[in-house]
């Protein structure tokens, strides 16, 4: 099998695993396990906890001692075992512990997957910049296929979604051993200080006011990323008594998957928007898109106002891509090449780490606050609260962040 196809299969499976449960697990926890909003949010925050330190730790192992594809495989085996165990428990503490274990070993595989691809493509003398994007896009396709599979088999509120993810994880773990080896670059990596290996040298970027502000907003916007992942499913499920035969209630994952489809289109628009409007305005557009994303959820329903929910899914592509991708490019421009990897790691820690933790617990608290004694959730006020949060961020960002065009951005160099 050609190497590009082999790496494409690996990326497809990598995100198929995540797509099997990320969007629908909230519905399973709320509907079948009876977890509260705060408990659902805390389970989603486990991905943030794992993202703070586990990618760095397993990255050190792959950089210094063990082939990256082997670390990748073992991590998937452990994560899959945790998912299988989670299908058999119903109490919150045990379920939370098992999902935390899954996150601790799955989240680092996102970075390891990229490392394996870069390593293999480089060793095979491909142009990584041109060869990797067409491979990576199949990860998004895998995510969407998984969502559709779980939905069409009616497993969105069943533990079977975890079995699907675990089965794909076990298969990917075995498959990884067939990928060309990605051994450590012993001479270079063993000379690196532990501080550099953990990505801590990127904190030099915080010395510059504008860059420090950017990372603060990265954390605050990162809090928004998991909200609809955690509560999109429960939101649609609560319409089952009012609109039991509506498309959104019958096929929640199919409706929510429009968000991921939208991502693939908005990625293509980023170069045009960055060139035309600059990094500051593009990120501002992203924050406004989050306001609309939550606002449309608050105004819509899966029946006569389904179009508002569809608009929310479409706008998600701008909300997610214009910040995550453009933000990554901004970090690439402000960071000295010597700390490039560390800088990207710091960006991930702020958005997918601390941001996800704050978003998980904060959104759970908001949902519980607007839930009455009978368990009825006031979804319009829940979504409008999130929209208000994003609107405040938009105003603050416009007032205090002064971003230049990327080509004029000053590089922050370590002392």
Image (cartoon, rainbow, N blue to C red):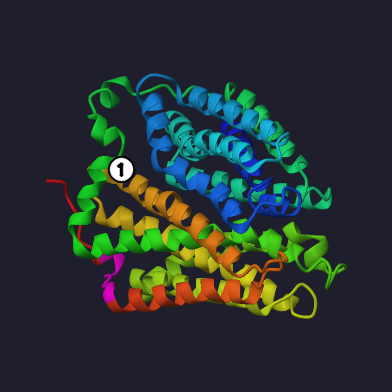
Kindly indicate the quadrant of the structure image that contains residue 185.
top left
Q: Main secondary structure of the magenta part?
A: loop
Residue 267 visible to an observer of this rendering: no
Q: Of 172 and 288, which appears nearest the observer?
A: 288
In the rendered image, residue 403, in percent from the top left (x then y), is placed at 28, 70
Decide: is 306 above or below 56: below
Relative placement, left or right, of 111 versus 141 is left
- Residue lying at 75% horizontally and 60% vertically, measured from the top left: 252
Relative placement, left or right, of 159 versus 320 is right
Residue extending farthest to the right is 245
The quarter in which the N terminus is drawn is: top right
In the rendered image, residue 372, in percent from the top left (x then y), is placed at 67, 69
Asked whether residue 401 is drawn in magenta, I would say: yes
Residue beneath disc 1: 342
Decide: is 1 above or below 44: above
Q: Which residues are magenta?
A: 400-407
- Residue lying at 46% horizontally and 26% vertically, measured from the top left: 68
* Mark 1 nearby-residue class (10 Å; few <14, some 14–19, many ≥20): many
Relative placement, left or right, of 340 versus 309 is left
Kindly indicate the quadrant of the structure image that contains residue 327.
bottom left
Decide: is 32 above or below 388: above
In the rendered image, residue 107, in percent from the top left (x then y), is placed at 51, 40
In the rendered image, residue 26, in percent from the top left (x then y), is placed at 66, 53
Residue 141 visible to an observer of this rendering: yes
């Amino acid at each position: 099998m050609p190497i590009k196809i082999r790496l494409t299969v690996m990326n497809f499976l990598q995100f198929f695993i995540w797509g099997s449960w990320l969007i629908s697990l909230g519905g399973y926890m709320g509907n079948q396990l009876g977890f509260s909003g705060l408990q659902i949010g805390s389970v989603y925050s486990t991905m943030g906890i794992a993202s703070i330190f586990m990618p760095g730790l397993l990255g050190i192992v792959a950089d210094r001692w063990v082939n990256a594809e082997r670390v990748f495989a073992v991590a998937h085996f452990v994560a899959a075992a945790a998912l299988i165990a989670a299908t058999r428990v119903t109490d919150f503490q045990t379920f939370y512990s098992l999902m935390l274990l899954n996150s601790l070993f799955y989240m680092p595989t996102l970075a390891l997957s990229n490392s394996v691809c870069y390593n293999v493509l480089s060793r095979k003398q491909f142009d990584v910049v041109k060869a990797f994007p067409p491979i990576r896009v199949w990860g998004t396709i895998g995510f969407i296929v998984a969502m559709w599979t779980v939905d069409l088999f009616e497993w969105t509120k069943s533990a079977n979604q975890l079995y699907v993810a675990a089965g794909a994880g076990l298969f990917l773990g075995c498959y990884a051993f067939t990928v060309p080896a990605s051994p450590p670059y012993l001479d270079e990596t063993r000379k690196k200080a532990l501080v550099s290996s953990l990505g801590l040298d990127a904190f030099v970027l915080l010395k510059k006011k504008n860059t420090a502000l950017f990372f603060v907003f990265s954390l605050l916007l990162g809090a928004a990323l998991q909200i609809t992942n955690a509560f999109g499913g429960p939101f649609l499920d609560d319409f089952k008594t009012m609109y039991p035969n509506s498309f959104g209630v019958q096929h929640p994952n199919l409706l929510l998957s429009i968000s991921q489809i939208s991502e693939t289109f908005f990625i293509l628009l980023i170069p045009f928007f960055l060139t035309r409007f600059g990094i500051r305005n593009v990120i501002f557009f992203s924050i406004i898109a989050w306001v609309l994303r939550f606002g449309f959820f608050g105004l819509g329903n899966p029946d006569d106002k389904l179009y508002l929910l569809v608009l929310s899914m479409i706008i998600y592509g701008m909300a997610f891509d214009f910040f995550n991708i453009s933000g990554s490019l901004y970090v690439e421009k402000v960071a000295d090449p010597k700390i490039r990897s560390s800088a990207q790691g710091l960006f991930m820690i702020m958005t997918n780490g601390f941001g996800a933790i704050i978003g998980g617990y904060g959104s759970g608290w908001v949902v519980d606050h607007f839930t009455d004694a009978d368990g009825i959730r006031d979804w319009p006020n829940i979504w409008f609260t999130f929209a208000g949060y994003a609107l405040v961020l938009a105003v603050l960002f416009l007032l205090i962040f002064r971003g230049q065009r990327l080509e004029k951005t000053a590089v922050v160099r370590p002392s």
